Image: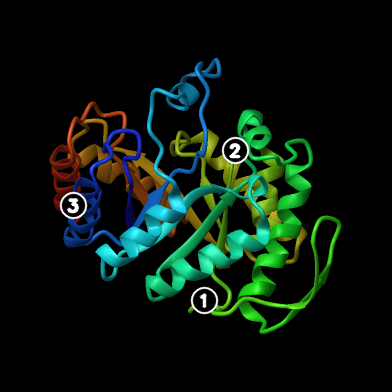
Amino acid sequence: MQIGVSFPTTEIGNNPEHIRRFAEGAEALGYDYLTCIDHVIQGRNAVADDWRAYYTIDNAFHETLVLFGFLAAATQKIGLTSAILILPQRPTVLVAKQLAEIDILSGGRLRAGVGIGWNALEFGALDQTFNNRARRIEEQIALLRKLWSEHLVTFEGEWHHIDDAGLNPLPVQQPIPIWIGAFEAPAIRRAGRISDGLLVNPRVKPGPDADAVLGHFRAGAEEAGREVTTLGLEATVFTQGRGGNAIREELEQWRERGASHVTLRTMTAGLTDVEGHLDALEEARRALD
């Protein structure tokens, strides 16, 4: 099992040295990968539920792909995972180019976690259609894989039309792994059908809700003639000031459910600086070793 950390994007501030320090520190502690949330623009007011309370103009979100270009140079071996990049609000060919570049600059350390998003405000601001995003992401994923693995591509889809053109340079990984982050049953089944792995809703804990998610993931894989055990599965464990024993116990519960990756998230624990986040990750690392 790989153990990663979530970049504390809403709490780290804007000092590039602090950003570098967090990534270097996570790498030095032996974590396998680093994830980052993606949001481009936020409104004044939160959507009326607890987990979306952070997605307002009062909380900073660093741009994931630019950040990963910076961290590719700041680190040597830690993996970089978008968790998740809201793919349908971006032009597919441009995203293909950007992710290929990150994979090159990092020496093949990128994992592309993508999803359909939930915030219509962002889609409108980026001049993209919100209502067809679920169908469009399937075509986007198919095109990304072709662009990353073929010298010249001819593609005729509902939304994308390419005639004998391609990317140069191509990424180190051909193709870059594409995982899907999903909250709802149809999207979770989509992950089982077409992705390389599922990023489970971070707020799902081991238990009946997790088992329901895994059931949908398995059903999607079976629908496509795939074996779910060949696909990746990533869950999230919040530290939130908890002791090492509690973190280890929850991680083991995810391991029993087949998780290949578990991400530790220090956000929402009331930490106020980079060293506080790294101290929490060091304490967790000692408990897990």
Left or right side of 42 for 156? right
For disc 2, the marked residue is: 183
Left or right side of 26 for 65? right
- Of labels 3 and 1, earlier in sequence is 3
| Residue 99 locus on image (x, y percent) | 52, 64
Amino acid type of the residue that numbered disc 1 sits on in the rendered structure:
Pro
Q: Nearer the viewer, mark 2 or mark 1?
A: 1
Amino acid type of the residue that numbered disc 2 sits on in the rendered structure:
Phe
| Residue 57 locus on image (x, y percent) | 44, 24
| Residue 119 locus on image (x, y percent) | 61, 31
Left or right side of 272 for 32? right
Q: Nearer the viewer, mark 2 or mark 3?
A: 3
Looking at the image, residue 264 lies above or below residue 270: below
Residues packed near mark 2 inside 10 Å, few (<14), some (14 to 19) or many (20 plus): some
- Of labels 2 and 3, earlier in sequence is 3
Visible residue check, residue 90: yes
* Labels in figure, total: 3
Q: CA distance from mark 2 to mark 1?
A: 29 Å
Q: Residue at x 15, y 37 (%)?
A: 276
Q: CA distance from mark 3 to mark 1?
A: 27 Å
| Residue 26 locus on image (x, y percent) | 22, 55
**Residue 9: which quarter of the image?**
top left
Residue 77 disc label: none
Question: Quadrant location of the C terminus?
Answer: bottom left
**Residue 75: which quarter of the image?**
bottom left
Q: CA distance from mark 2 to mark 3?
A: 32 Å
For disc 1, the marked residue is: 171
Residue 21 disc label: 3
Question: Quadrant location of the N terminus?
Answer: bottom left
